[in-house]
């Protein structure tokens, strides 16, 4: 199908509104940072002696440095380290003792020499002591329970700027160096680092052993890893690389899945990047409690065990798929981030956005039955929700201080970064995009790069103005809504696409334009295989074909002619665009009438856009509810994700109103048909998608008060107490949630006992989530103090407050959080600390709570936590406005309920 584009005469003027992408290619000396570049590290020889009992360690490091130009000053990073001695050596000369100058505020260690140091190689030797932290930074300890009693392991977490807690070092990503690590640990311990063990020697006394590791390639300091404890390791060898999964004792059954998955992912990435994984081994190291998420240390990925381990007898399908996605993300970093490293933290999105996109791409390729790109719409919606507000920030934002980096690890960096890259790949072409990525990887391996280097490689591979397109999406906030109209005149379809900035709380620049890659398709009910995603809703007649044509919008309004008027018009049929689509009423009606034949991706897109337009006041809520009413026996989990979330949000907004009962009747009537089709019991050969949908629908129906679902969930819990094997892993989350939500005191007490006895983080999370869900305010009040228990993993303490608030007790949870603010803050760290108070009120719609949140964060947390609070406050205020608009519309939108 040929498209004839006629752009408006104002295009030339409009193009003047686009800013030029000014970032320069990577250059060492012009890379931002606080440390001078006159002296650089080449290799660290580091020896550690940790003392678990005193939670301290001794360190000795000899750093081979290269003096690039004469200087009297050596400046590197150090934080919370006590320097015992320091000396400088050169070519066998007598060591020169140095006087350390520590600056706690700047986190630097400086040495000033009497005479300039000559260019060339020298050795800097430093003896020091440090602290083993409870917080997840530097070298930290993780206490966990076993059947034999409590145990402790040690691990490291250095991103973005915590390697300086482990050793004096040049702790900025541009300073790549090799690391030779050794450590003295108890003989009952094993130890792991980025590289394989080179030797293992018993020490006098028989209590300690010295484990030495092979040297790493030159890499950024934040990638250095060290873990030691009573650990077990499963391995396999593939293509010359030893793959390992490391767990605490007794969990190797759950290591089989990540071991096999890591092997599959490594082979896929070897092929995709055109550069083989360069290290001799890759470990997935699963730690029990303290660490939240995963960290891509080169050759030694450290993850919370819930993020990587999978036991089919205990873990749900959702947990299995999340584990694979986490591994895919972190292994992608082994190339994009480790082999090629961002020059400075303003390019963090290049690490995280790319790994999110690449991980999803790999997961989809290796597990096509999961339809992960459909579900990836959830992360895009999260990002777009944040990005539609004045409090948003660009994907690529200036970073002057590493201490503010935790604020950049958010939905914009991950979700918008991934969504933009997918949109860009679709526009450039999959093969052409891969060719550019391979060129970028080969050109910059074992070095650093900037975003400009990536755009240059893609431009060379595709011949398209990638940097200009990318600048609109990466250096500025927001996204457009594209208004769509079409008429048929003389047998030709005339399409008008008009872009405007989209926002929930107004827009900063109403005249702003984007270069927008858009796919324009038509839908015909003909017996051909869909070129996008051909599964219609259950019972849809025939198959469908979507023929997308790619255009690049650059003006305010673009007019397009198509020969012929057949087929329903579908904009962005594969749902890859980072923009909203607002159809004219007649076009929207056509899509509604064709709903069963629409590809699942188009159904997801239409639902999410209709909801966002209603929230922004650009469309009536009745448009969205009409789509919901047409869902019927919708089989796709991804299509249900948006409605389930939004119905829950409406339920929160309507608390205390007479409309809430009508909404709940509407929700139960909507959700009952697909749940009854699935039933409670899985059938032989059933897809994982069906099991996940069953669990989500059961939990939602119970939340909306479906008496039959509640009774069945409670009955299954009683059978579980008598026989734990009676509850399949796929139903554990909804059944426990139902029991927790409608708990009696006896149920609540039983859940507390189960949580206390649980030995894995996943089990603890499951029981605590159930406790947090209690509707009874007396039980909620009993649950909140659990957030202060030091025995609870730090990853779960914040979830207590958020869960209780989400269960309908925002005021109760907020009062508890403010009363115990000092203790709660002390128990959290990093990004978790920034989210501590916002997550308590994130479901609120009272503007007074927005003001209270800002006041509390200003009083209790560092300045770096304020942006997160401001974003949540903006969400609360927007919800208040939406609530005021939605109440008058609700009766009509619910069809007279």
Image: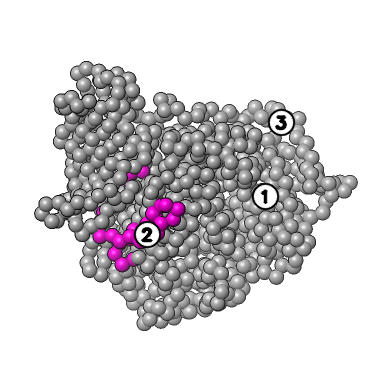
Q: Vertical placement of 340 versus 319: above or below? A: above
Q: Earlier in the sequence, mark 3 or mark 1?
A: 3
859 displayed left or right of 126: right
Q: At numbered mark 2, what does the secondary structure look like: helix, strand or loop?
A: strand
Q: At numbered mark 1, what does the secondary structure look like: helix, strand or loop?
A: loop
Q: Which mark is residue 11?
A: 3
Q: CA distance from mark 3 to mark 2?
A: 60 Å
Which of the 4 image quadrants contains residue 895? bottom right
* Residue furthest to the front: 240
For the residue pair 674 and 528, the one nearer the viewer reads as 528
Q: Vertical placement of 582 versus 787: above or below? A: above
639 displayed left or right of 297: right
- Residue at 41% over, 68% down: 311
Can you identify the residue that label 2 sits on?
A: 235
872 displayed left or right of 112: right
Residues tagged 1 and 2 counted as in contact (Cβ below 8 A): no
* Residue furthest to the top: 115
Q: Earlier in the sequence, mark 1 or mark 2?
A: 2
Q: Which mark is residue 572?
A: 1
| x and y, in percent, of residue 851 in the image | 42, 46
Mark 1 surroundings within 10 Å by alpha-carbon count, few (fewer than 14), some (14 through 19), many (20 or more): many
* Residue furthest to the right: 490
Residues drawn in magenta? 222-251
Q: CA distance from mark 1 to mark 2?
A: 44 Å
| x and y, in percent, of residue 412 in the image | 50, 44
Q: At numbered mark 3, what does the secondary structure look like: helix, strand or loop?
A: helix
């Amino acid at each position: 199908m040929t498209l004839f584009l006629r752009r408006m005469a104002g295009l030339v003027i409009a193009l003047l509104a686009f800013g030029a992408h000014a970032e320069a290619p990577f250059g060492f000396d012009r890379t931002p940072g606080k440390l001078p570049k006159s002296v650089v590290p080449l290799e660290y020889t580091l020896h550690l002696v940790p003392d678990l009992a005193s939670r301290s360690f001794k360190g000795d490091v000899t750093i081979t440095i290269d003096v690039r130009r004469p200087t009297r000053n050596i400046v590197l990073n150090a934080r919370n380290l006590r320097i015992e001695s320091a000396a400088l050596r050169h070519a066998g000369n007598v060591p020169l003792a140095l006087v350390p100058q520590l600056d706690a505020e700047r986190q630097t260690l400086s040495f000033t020499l009497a005479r300039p140091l000559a260019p060339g190689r020298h050795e800097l030797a430093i003896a020091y002591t440090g602290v083993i932290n409870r917080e997840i930074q530097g070298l930290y300890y993780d206490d966990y329970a076993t059947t034999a009693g409590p145990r402790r392991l040690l691990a490291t977490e250095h991103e973005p700027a915590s390697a300086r807690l482990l050793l004096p070092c040049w702790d900025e990503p541009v300073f790549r160096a090799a690391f030779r690590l050794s450590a003295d640990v108890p003989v009952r311990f094993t130890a792991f680092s980025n590289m394989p063990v080179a030797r293992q020697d018993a020490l006098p006394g028989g209590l300690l052993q010295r484990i030495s590791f092979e040297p790493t390639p030159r890499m950024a300091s934040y990638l250095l890893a060290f873990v030691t404890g009573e650990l077990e390791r499963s391995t396999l060898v593939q293509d010359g690389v030893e793959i390992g999964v490391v767990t605490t004792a007794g969990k190797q059954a759950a290591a089989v899945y990540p071991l096999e998955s890591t092997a599959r992912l490594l082979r896929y990435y070897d092929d995709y990047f055109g550069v083989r994984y360069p290290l001799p081994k890759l470990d997935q190291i699963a730690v029990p409690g303290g660490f939240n998420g995963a960290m891509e240390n080169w050759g030694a990925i450290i993850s919370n065990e819930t993020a990587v381990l999978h036991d089919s007898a205990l873990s749900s399908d959702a947990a299995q798929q999340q584990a694979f996605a986490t591994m895919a993300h972190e292994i992608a970093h082994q190339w994009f981030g480790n082999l090629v490293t961002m020059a400075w933290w303003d390019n963090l999105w290049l690490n995280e956005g790319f790994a999110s996109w690449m991980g999803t791409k790999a997961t989809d390729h290796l597990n096509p039955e999961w339809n992960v790109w459909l579900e990836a719409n959830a992360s895009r919606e999260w990002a777009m929700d944040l990005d539609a507000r004045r409090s948003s920030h660009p994907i690529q934002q200036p970073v002057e201080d590493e201490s503010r980096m935790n604020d950049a690890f958010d939905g914009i960096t991950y979700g918008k970064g991934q969504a933009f890259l997918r949109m860009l790949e679709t526009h450039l072409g999959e093969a052409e995009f891969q060719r550019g990525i391979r060129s970028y990887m080969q050109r910059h391996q074992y070095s650093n790069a900037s975003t400009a280097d990536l755009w240059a490689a893609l431009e060379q591979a595709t011949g398209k103005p990638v940097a200009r397109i990318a600048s609109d999406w990466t250096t500025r906030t927001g996204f457009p809504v594209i208004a769509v109209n079409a008429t048929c005149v003389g047998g030709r379809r005339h399409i008008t696409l008009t872009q405007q900035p989209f926002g929930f709380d107004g827009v900063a620049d109403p005249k702003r334009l984007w270069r927008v890659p858009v796919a324009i398709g038509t839908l015909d009910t003909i017996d051909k295989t869909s070129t996008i995603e051909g599964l219609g809703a259950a019972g849809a007649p025939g198959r469908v074909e979507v023929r997308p044509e790619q255009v690049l919008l650059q003006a305010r309004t673009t007019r397009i002619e198509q020969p012929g008027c057949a087929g329903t018009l579908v904009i962005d049929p594969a749902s890859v665009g980072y923009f909203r689509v607002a159809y004219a009423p007649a076009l929207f009606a056509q899509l509604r009438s064709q709903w069963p034949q629409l590809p699942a991706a188009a159904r997801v897109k239409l639902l999410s856009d209709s909801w966002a337009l209603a929230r922004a006041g650009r469309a009536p809520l009745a448009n969205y509810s009409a789509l919901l009413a047409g869902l019927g026996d919708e089989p796709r989990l991804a299509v249900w994700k948006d409605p389930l979330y939004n119905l829950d949000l409406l339920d929160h907004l309507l608390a205390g109103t007479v409309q809430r009962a009508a909404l709940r009747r509407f929700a139960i009537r909507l959700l009952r048909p697909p749940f009854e089709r699935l039933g409670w019991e899985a059938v032989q050969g059933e897809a994982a998608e069906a099991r996940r949908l069953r669990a989500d629908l059961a939990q939602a129906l119970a939340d909306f008060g479906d008496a039959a679902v509640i009774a069945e969930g409670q009955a299954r819990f009683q059978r579980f107490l008598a026989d734990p094997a009676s509850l399949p892993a796929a139903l554990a989350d909804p059944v426990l949630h139902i029991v927790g939500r409608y708990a009696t005191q006896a149920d609540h007490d039983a859940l507390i006992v189960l949580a206390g006895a649980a030995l894995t983080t996943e089990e603890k999370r499951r029981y605590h989530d159930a406790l947090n869900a209690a509707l009874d305010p007396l039980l909620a009040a009993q649950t909140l103090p659990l957030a202060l228990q030091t025995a609870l993993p730090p990853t779960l303490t914040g979830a207590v407050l958020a869960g209780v608030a989400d269960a309908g007790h925002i005021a109760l949870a907020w009062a508890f959080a403010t009363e115990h603010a000092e203790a709660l803050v002390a128990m959290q760290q990093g990004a978790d600390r920034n989210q501590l108070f916002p997550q308590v009120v994130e479901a609120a719609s009272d503007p007074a709570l927005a003001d209270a949140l800002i006041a509390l964060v200003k009083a209790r947390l560092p300045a770096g936590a304020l942006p997160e609070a401001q974003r949540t406050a903006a969400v609360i205020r927007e919800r208040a406005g939406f609530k005021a608009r939605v109440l008058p519309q609700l009766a009509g939108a619910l069809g007279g309920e």
